[in-house]
């Protein structure tokens, strides 16, 4: 078996409900690999075909393509990430996604750049959590905790960016330019499932937002 570390951790996988969607998904997977434009294109093509040859990795792809349009899009949109995910422990991947976002905290120069980074991170985190979930790698507590911590981080990054922009426009003064949230007077309280670190896939984040001008 090819060294797909994640595959070795899977305990179970759901049966695909839509076999037609599986067939279409496999063709889209091959097309995505061919057209990825990755610098290591030949290596990526080899890994992509190896995933289809290995029974357990193919079963995972079929479970995704045959049951979830959203997860299918996550796989097709970024085949390079999916290949890397299969070669890794989902705990390490989730930590990497969070770390990379934290490292970008001070680098966002526009709303568009912020939103693009958050969308990519959300797609990658969603796929990582979902596979760990359907493969019974993580328990329910771990899944809801990871969803909540990711939501908390994206909220913090957005608040930090907006505070920095508001300060640059003269709307307020930051007490700590290196850490805009610190002593800013902005208070964001996560209610319900976010506050309890129990978010599920369809949860809204209910917030109370306060601002102390003093």
Image (spheres, helix red, strand yellow):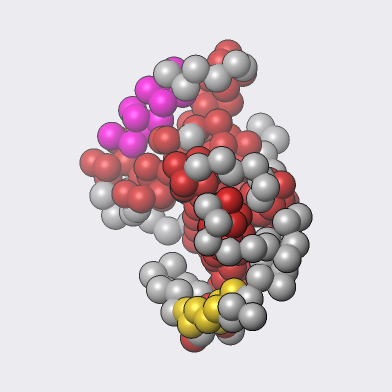
Q: Which residues are magenta?
A: 24-34
Figure label count: 0
Closer to us: 98 or 27: 98
Looking at the image, can residue 34 be seen?
yes
Q: Magenta segment: does it hold 29?
A: yes
The single residue placed furthest to the top in the displayed view is: 42
Name the dominant secondary structure of the magenta segment. Answer: helix
Q: Position of residue 74 (x, y in %)?
A: 43, 43
Quadrant (top left, top right, bottom left, bottom right) of the N terminus = top right
Closer to us: 129 or 100: 100
Q: Magenta segment: does it hold 129?
A: no
Residue 61 sits in which quadrant?
Answer: top left
Closer to us: 168 or 14: 168
Looking at the image, can residue 131 be seen?
no
Q: Residue at x 39, y 70 (%)?
A: 202
Q: Position of residue 119 (x, y in %)?
A: 46, 48
The single residue placed furthest to the left in the displayed view is: 20
Q: Position of residue 191 (x, y in %)?
A: 51, 84
Q: Residue at x 36, y 50 (%)?
A: 70
Q: Residue at x 46, y 46 (%)?
A: 111
Left or right: 99 with respect to 118? right
Residue 210 against residue 93 in the figure, above or below: below
Quadrant (top left, top right, bottom left, bottom right) of the C terminus = bottom right
Q: Position of residue 185 (x, y in %)?
A: 63, 76
Residue 117 against residue 205 in the figure, above or below: above
Left or right: 186 with respect to 183? left
Residue 88 against residue 170 in the figure, above or below: above
Q: Residue at x 33, y 28 (%)?
A: 27
């Amino acid at each position: 078996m090819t060294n797909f570390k994640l595959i070795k951790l899977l305990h179970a996988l759901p049966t695909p409900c839509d076999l037609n969607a599986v067939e279409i998904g496999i063709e889209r997977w091959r097309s995505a690999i061919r057209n990825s434009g990755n610098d290591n294109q030949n290596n990526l093509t080899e890994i992509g075909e190896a995933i289809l040859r290995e029974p357990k990795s193919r079963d995972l792809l079929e479970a995704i393509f045959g049951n979830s349009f959203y997860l299918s899009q996550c796989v097709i949109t970024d085949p390079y990430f999916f290949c890397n995910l299969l070669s890794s422990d989902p705990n390490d991947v989730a930590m990497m996604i969070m770390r990379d976002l934290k490292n970008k905290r001070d680098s966002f120069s526009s709303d568009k750049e912020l939103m693009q980074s958050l969308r990519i991170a959300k797609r990658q985190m969603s796929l990582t959590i979902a596979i760990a979930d359907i493969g019974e790698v993580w328990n329910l507590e771990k899944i809801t905790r990871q969803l909540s911590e990711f939501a908390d981080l994206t909220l913090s990054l957005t608040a930090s960016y907006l505070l920095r922009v508001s300060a640059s426009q003269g709307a307020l003064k930051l007490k700590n330019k290196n850490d805009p949230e610190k002593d800013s007077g902005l208070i964001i309280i996560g209610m319900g499932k976010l506050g309890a670190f129990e978010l599920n896939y369809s949860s809204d984040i209910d917030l109370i937002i306060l601002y102390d001008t003093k």
